[in-house]
Image (spheres, rainbow, N blue to C red):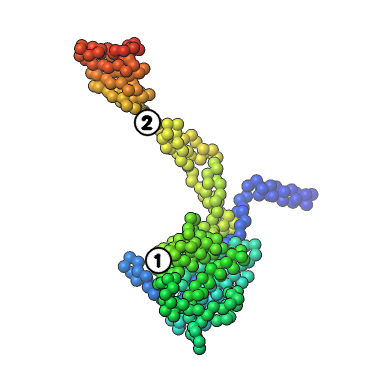
């Protein structure tokens, strides 16, 4: 008997869960976000905002802290920086694996990087390619993202021992799946190539390697958001990278040489806003709340949050006025739009067209008139009278189609009467 009672209790509890008697959050997969951060020497340059000079590296750390503090349980976070520990043009490495509650560790790792140690270059392409090969970043069946942040061009200056200058090493070319390792450095040899304008040295011929890395990430099921920080980024390469990463801004031009497809962050505040917007996009989804109103919900460690939506929606009344409908007990109320009406004393109604009124009268198509007034579609009214097709006249006046009213006995109709096919007088007040 006890066993039967226990089974019955379990059944009741299960039915409560199914019917919503006990609230359980719907499970969801937390997005997995790997921040791939540029830590090249140029990040030690400053940008000015509100007359304050801020080191870009400090601004980057502040932005990452803000976003990981604001969304500690809305995503799993990781950190990869380039160049690697060896500096120079060494491929970037993962400092913090993607996981829960890693924000403090990420902040500590960024603070501990020795930015003053020698020449730190920009092997962005090699680093993104390495990310695409990391199973900790490309975990199957998960929502995986990379946030790629850079403040400059792909840059690796490898001095030649003899012969013409080289762009990079054969090992790098192998890592990038480039079969023929380039040996050009057109922007360093005084080339008149217009594509070199504004580009001061480095390996121009591997300028687009970040795109190859992003394409490899896309093939592994990872979307890449691109943030260009500062005013010296390679806009053309970043536009293409954002496009190939599946996160381009709607309507952008991936072949443009000016910012179009990626997040442009010239100022620290724009950098903060860019990261916040990216996280908002990957951690929320559209949902339908009561009364069919569209809202949004966020994925958290305990499951989807409640659907957050407005409690009222815009509506239009029968007369074209704007109003609101409120959601009450699962149903929308009637539209509370208020139509304007005419007052007493001969004011014109809605949509009064081409009418004219004299003293004591009023005109307007389909209008309403107060005491002593009248309405007509195109009439003219004199003192004490009114005119117009199917109009209404106050005391002492009469209406007729296209008639003229006046006080003079020498008019077409004297003393307040109307000429021409009169519709007959109608007594007023």
Q: Nearer the viewer, residue 423 or 35?
A: 423
Residue 384 position, x and y percent, is: 24, 17
Q: Is residue 290 left or right of residue 380?
A: right
Asked whether the beta carbons under mark 2 and mark 1 sit within 8 Å of each other, the answer is no
Label 2 residue SS? loop
User: Label 1: few (<14), some or many (≥20) within 10 Å?
Assistant: some
Query: How many marks on residues?
Result: 2
Mark 2 or mark 1: name the one nearer the start of the chain.
1
Residue appearing at x 40%, y 72% in the figure: 198
Quadrant of the image containing the C terminus: top left
In the rendered view, tell whether residue 383 sits above or below residue 16.
above
Residue 386 position, x and y percent, is: 29, 18
Residue 355 position, x and y percent, is: 31, 25
Q: Nearer the viewer, residue 68 or 277?
A: 277
Label 1 residue SS? loop
Residue appearing at x 23%, y 18% in the figure: 383
In the rendered view, tell whether residue 28 sits above or below residue 58.
above
Q: Nearer the viewer, residue 342 or 179?
A: 179
In the rendered view, tell whether residue 219 sits above or below residue 403.
below
Residue appearing at x 75%, y 50% in the figure: 7
The tag on residue 399 is none
The tag on residue 340 is 2
**Quick one: which residue is furthest to the bottom in this view?**
162
Separation of disc 2 and disc 1 at Cα? 50 Å
Mark 2, mark 1: which one is toward the viewer? 1
Can residue 205 be seen here? The reply is yes
Q: Which residue is mark 1?
A: 266
């Amino acid at each position: 008997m006890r066993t039967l009672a226990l089974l019955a209790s379990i059944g009741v509890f299960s039915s409560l869960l199914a019917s919503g008697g006990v609230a359980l959050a719907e499970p969801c997969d937390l997005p997995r976000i790997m921040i791939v951060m540029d830590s090249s020497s140029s990040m030690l340059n400053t940008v000015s905002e509100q007359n304050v000079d801020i080191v870009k590296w400090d601004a980057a750390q502040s932005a990452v802290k803000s976003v990981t503090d604001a969304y500690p349980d809305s995503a799993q976070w990781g950190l990869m920086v380039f160049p690697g520990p060896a500096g120079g043009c060494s491929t970037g490495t993962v400092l913090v694996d993607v996981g829960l509650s890693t924000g403090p560790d990420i902040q500590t790792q960024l603070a501990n990087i020795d930015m003053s140690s020698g020449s730190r270059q920009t092997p962005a392409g090699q680093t993104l390619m390495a990310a695409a090969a990391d199973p900790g970043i490309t975990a199957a069946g998960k929502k995986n993202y990379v946030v790629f942040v850079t403040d400059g061009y792909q840059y690796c200056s490898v001095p030649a021992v003899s012969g013409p200058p080289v762009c990079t090493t054969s090992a790098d070319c192998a890592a990038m799946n480039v079969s023929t390792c380039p040996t050009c450095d057109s922007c360093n040899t005084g080339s008149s190539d217009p594509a070199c304008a504004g580009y001061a040295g480095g390996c121009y011929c591997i300028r687009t390697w970040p795109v190859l890395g992003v394409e490899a990430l896309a093939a592994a099921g990872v979307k890449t958001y691109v943030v260009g920080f500062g005013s010296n980024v390679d806009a053309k390469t970043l536009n293409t990278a954002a496009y190939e990463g599946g996160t381009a801004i709607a309507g952008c031009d991936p072949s443009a040489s000016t910012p179009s497809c990626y997040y442009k962050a010239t100022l620290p505040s724009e950098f903060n806003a860019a990261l916040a917007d990216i996280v908002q996009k990957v951690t929320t989804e559209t949902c339908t709340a009561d009364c069919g109103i569209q809202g949004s919900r966020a994925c958290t460690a305990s499951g989807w949050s409640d659907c957050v939506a407005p409690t009222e929606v815009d509506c239009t009344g029968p007369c074209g006025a704007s109003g609101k409908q409120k959601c009450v007990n699962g149903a929308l109320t009637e539209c509370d739009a208020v139509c304007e009406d005419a007052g007493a004393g001969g004011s014109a109604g809605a949509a009064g067209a081409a009418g004219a009124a004299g003293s004591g009268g009023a005109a307007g198509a389909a209008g309403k008139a107060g005491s002593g007034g009248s309405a007509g579609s195109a009439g003219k009214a004199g003192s004490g009278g009114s005119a117009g097709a199917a109009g209404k006249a106050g005391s002492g006046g009469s209406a007729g189609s296209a008639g003229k009213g006046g006080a003079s006995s020498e008019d077409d109709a004297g003393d307040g009467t109307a000429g021409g096919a009169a519709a007959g007088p109608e007594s007023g007040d």
